[in-house]
C-alpha cells in the first residue's frame, strides 16, 4: 500500500508539472534520497564519512580589519611568520556566502583561537608570533587577533544553521614559548627539559617537543596553585572571582585533583558547554599520557549533553561529542594501535572516535582500486565502529601529496572518494601554492611555506582555478549527499573502464551509488550489472545527465573522465 501511495503521489507531481508546462526540478543538494524500494528516508550524519574543511584561522579570510594588531605585536617577523588578519568573522562570512556548502563540507576544523603568547620568539627562522594558535597563554580567553567569544558563538550558530558541524582545535600538551612578554609557567605545571628523542614512550611523552616549548606535566595528579601571572591577568581584566568560582564548582562536581591537566580540561570544555562545539581535533596526542584523553572526552561529552539540554531548539541531532586525534605518523595500516618502539597504545580506547591518517598522501601514488580496497578492508574489520580522517596536505606536513599542485583533479578524486572521513586543507580546492620561496635574503623557511593566505584573488581572476574548484565542488557535494562514499562498503564492478559501487545500510536508511574514474572521453559504457537492475533510472551528477540501465550498462556521451551515478529522484 505504501508503494502504491508513493507512486500515486509521484504521478500527481508529474501531472502538475506538465499542466504548468514545466519539468520537475532536480535538487542535487537534497538531504533525502529515494531508494529502489521506493521508501523515502532522511539522510543521517556520520563522522566516519564526514567532509571536513581544515583552515588556519589567521590565513583564511579577513572579515574584520580593526582587530589585525593587538598586544603591540608589531616586531618584524620571518616571512609568513606573523599575523596576517584572518579571523572568526571571516570564517562566518564564508559560511553565509555558501562557500562551504557549495564544496560539500559538513564540518569545519579551525586552528586554536585561545589567547596566544603576546611576544614573538626566534625559531632560527626569524621572529614568529603565535598566528597559528598552538602557543596558548590563557586558555580561558579568545585572542583578539582572532576575534571575540561572541563572534565565535555566532560562527558556531551560523554553521549549525547550514548543517555544518564545528571542530575546535585544542592543545593540552604545552603552553606557548617563553618571551620577554610571556613568563614561563611554574615548575609544578611545566617541564622545560629534556627535549624529546621520540625513540620510546617516555622520551615522547615526558619531554618538550622542541626547545622553549614548556611541556605541561599531564601525568601528574598532584594539586597545584594557579600561576601568579594568570591570577594577576584575570584580576586586571575584572574576572578573577568568576574564574575562581567556576573552578571551585568544577572540582567539587568532578572530584578531580587540582592537577595541571584538569585545569586545562575544564577551560577547554567550557567552550563546548557555552557554545555547543561539536567536537575537538586534538593536537600532539602521542606526547601526552593517554588516560588524559579519556578524561578530556568524558568532560567534553558531559558539557555537550548539558548544552543540548539547555538549547534543545539548536540541537542538530543525537550525534555524540566527537574527538579526532593527531597522533603524528599514525597510519591506517596500524589498525587500532600506535607503536612507540617499546610499547603500543590504542588511542581509540582512550576517548578518540577517529585518528588523522598520515598514509593517504603516499597511497595516492598507487591506483584507485588499491586505495579504496585497502581502506574499505581496514575500516570494516580492525577499525569497525571507529574511523580515520584522510588528508593529502596539511599545515605541518613538509612532504604533502603533489606539493607542486600538478594534478589537483586527481587529488580531489583520491581524497573525496576514499573510504573514511576527508580533510580538505584550505586551498586544496583552489590549488593554493604550497611552495612560497621568499627572497634570497629573506627566504620562507620550514612549514611557513604551507601557510600562505587563502588565494581568493586568484580564484576571482583565473579561470583554471575556478575549474578546479568546480571539480572539487561536484565531488564534495556528491560525497555529502551520499554517506555510502565515505562510510559505505566498496566493490569494484569493472576494471576497464574503472567502475565501482558503494553501499551504506544502517537501520532503515539505505544508500547506493556507482562511480566511474579514468573514463574515456566521448561515448562510454559503464558496467552496473548486479548492482542496478535494467530499467533503473539513474542521474550522473557530474555531467548532469539522466540515464537508464540497459543490458547491465549505463551509456554516457561527454568529455568527462568521471561519472557520479545516483538513483534518479
Image (cartoon, grey):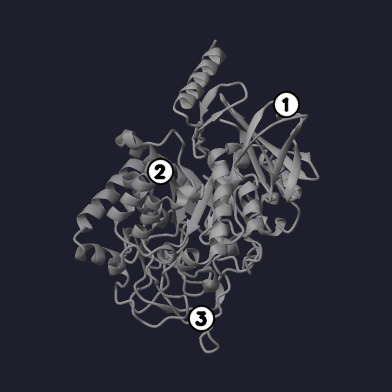
Residue at 64% across, 57% down: 409
Is disc 3 placed on a helix, strand or loop? loop
Q: Are the residues tagged 2 and 1 within 8 Å (C-beta)?
A: no
Residue of label 2: 162
| Residue 359 visible here | no
Is disc 2 placed on a helix, strand or loop? loop
Spatial CA span between label 3 and label 2:
41 Å
**87 up-or-down from 127: above or below:** above
Q: Residue 204: where, in percent of width, then height?
A: 58, 63
Residue at 48% across, 31% down: 22
Dot 1 surroundings within 10 Å: few (below 14), some, or many (20 or more)? some
Using the rendered view, name the quadrant where residue 285 is placed. Answer: bottom right
Residue lying farthest to the right in this orientation: 496
Is disc 1 placed on a helix, strand or loop? loop
**547 up-or-down from 229: above or below:** above
Q: Which of 18 and 72 is in front in this view?
A: 18
Amino acid at each position: 500500500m505504501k508503494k502504491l501511495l508513493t507512486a500515486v503521489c509521484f504521478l500527481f507531481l508529474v501531472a502538475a508539472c506538465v499542466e504548468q508546462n514545466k519539468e520537475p526540478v532536480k535538487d542535487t543538494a537534497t538531504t533525502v534520497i529515494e531508494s529502489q524500494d521506493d521508501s523515502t528516508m532522511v539522510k543521517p550524519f556520520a563522522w566516519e564519512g564526514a567532509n571536513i574543511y581544515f583552515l588556519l584561522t589567521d590565513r583564511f579570510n579577513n572579515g574584520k580589519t580593526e582587530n589585525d594588531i593587538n598586544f603591540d605585536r608589531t616586531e618584524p617577523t620571518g616571512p609568513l611568520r606573523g599575523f596576517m588578519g584572518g579571523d572568526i568573522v571571516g570564517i562566518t562570512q564564508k559560511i553565509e556566502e555558501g562557500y562551504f556548502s557549495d564544496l560539500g563540507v559538513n564540518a569545519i576544523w579551525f586552528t586554536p583561537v585561545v589567547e596566544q603568547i603576546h611576544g614573538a620568539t626566534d625559531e632560527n627562522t626569524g621572529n614568529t608570533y603565535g598566528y597559528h594558535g598552538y602557543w596558548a597563554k590563557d586558555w580561558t580567553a579568545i585572542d583578539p587577533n582572532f576575534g571575540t567569544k561572541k563572534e565565535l558563538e555566532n560562527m558556531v550558530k551560523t554553521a549549525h544553521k547550514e548543517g555544518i558541524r564545528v571542530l575546535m582545535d585544542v592543545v593540552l600538551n604545552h603552553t606557548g614559548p617563553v618571551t620577554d612578554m610571556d613568563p614561563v609557567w611554574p615548575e609544578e605545571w611545566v617541564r622545560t627539559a629534556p627535549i624529546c628523542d621520540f625513540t620510546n614512550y617516555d622520551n615522547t611523552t615526558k619531554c618538550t617537543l622542541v626547545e622553549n616549548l614548556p611541556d605541561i606535566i599531564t601525568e601528574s595528579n598532584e594539586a597545584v596553585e594557579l600561576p601568579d601571572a594568570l591570577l594577576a591577568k584575570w584580576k586586571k581584566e575584572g574576572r578573577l572571582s568568576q574564574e575562581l568560582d567556576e573552578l571551585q564548582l568544577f572540582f567539587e562536581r568532578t572530584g578531580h585533583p587540582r592537577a595541571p591537566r584538569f585545569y586545562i580540561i575544564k577551560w577547554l570544555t567550557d567552550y563546548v558547554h557555552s557554545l555547543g562545539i561539536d567536537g575537538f581535533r586534538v593536537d600532539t596526542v602521542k606526547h601526552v599520557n593517554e588516560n588524559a584523553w579519556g578524561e578530556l572526552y568524558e568532560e567534553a561529552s558531559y558539557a555537550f549533553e548539558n548544552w543540548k539540554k539547555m538549547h534543545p531548539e539548536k540541537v542538530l541531532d543525537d550525534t555524540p561529542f566527537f574527538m579526532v586525534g593527531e597522533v603524528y605518523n599514525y597510519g591506517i595500516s596500524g589498525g587500532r594501535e600506535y607503536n612507540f618502539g617499546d610499547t603500543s597504545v590504542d588511542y581509540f580506547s582512550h576517548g578518540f572516535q577517529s585518528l588523522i591518517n598520515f598514509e593517504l598522501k603516499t597511497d595516492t601514488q598507487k591506483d584507485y582500486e588499491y586505495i579504496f580496497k585497502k581502506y574499505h578492508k581496514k575500516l570494516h574489520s580492525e577499525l569497525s565502529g571507529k574511523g580515520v580522517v584522510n588528508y593529502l596536505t596539511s599545515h605541518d606536513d613538509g612532504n604533502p601529496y603533489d606539493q607542486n599542485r600538478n594534478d589537483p583533479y586527481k587529488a580531489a578524486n583520491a581524497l573525496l572518494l576514499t573510504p573514511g572521513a576527508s580533510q580538505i586543507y584550505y586551498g586544496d580546492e583552489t590549488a593554493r601554492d604550497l611552495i612560497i620561496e621568499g627572497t634570497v635574503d629573506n627566504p620562507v623557511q620550514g612549514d611557513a611555506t604551507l601557510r600562505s593566505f587563502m588565494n581568493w584573488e586568484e580564484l576571482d581572476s583565473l579561470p583554471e582555478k575556478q575549474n578546479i574548484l568546480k571539480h572539487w565542488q561536484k565531488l564534495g557535494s556528491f560525497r555529502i549527499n551520499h554517506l555510502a562514499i565515505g562510510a559505505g562498503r566498496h566493490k569494484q564492478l569493472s576494471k576497464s573502464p574503472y567502475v565501482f559501487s558503494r553501499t551504506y545500510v544502517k537501520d532503515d536508511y539505505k544508500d547506493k551509488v556507482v562511480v566511474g574514474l579514468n573514463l574515456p572521453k566521448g561515448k562510454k559504457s559503464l558496467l552496473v550489472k548486479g548492482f542496478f537492475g535494467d530499467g533503473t533510472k539513474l542521474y550522473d551528477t557530474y555531467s548532469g545527465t539522466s540515464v537508464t540501465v540497459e543490458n547491465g550498462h549505463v551509456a554516457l556521451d561527454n568529455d568527462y573522465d568521471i561519472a557520479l551515478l545516483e538513483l534518479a529522484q
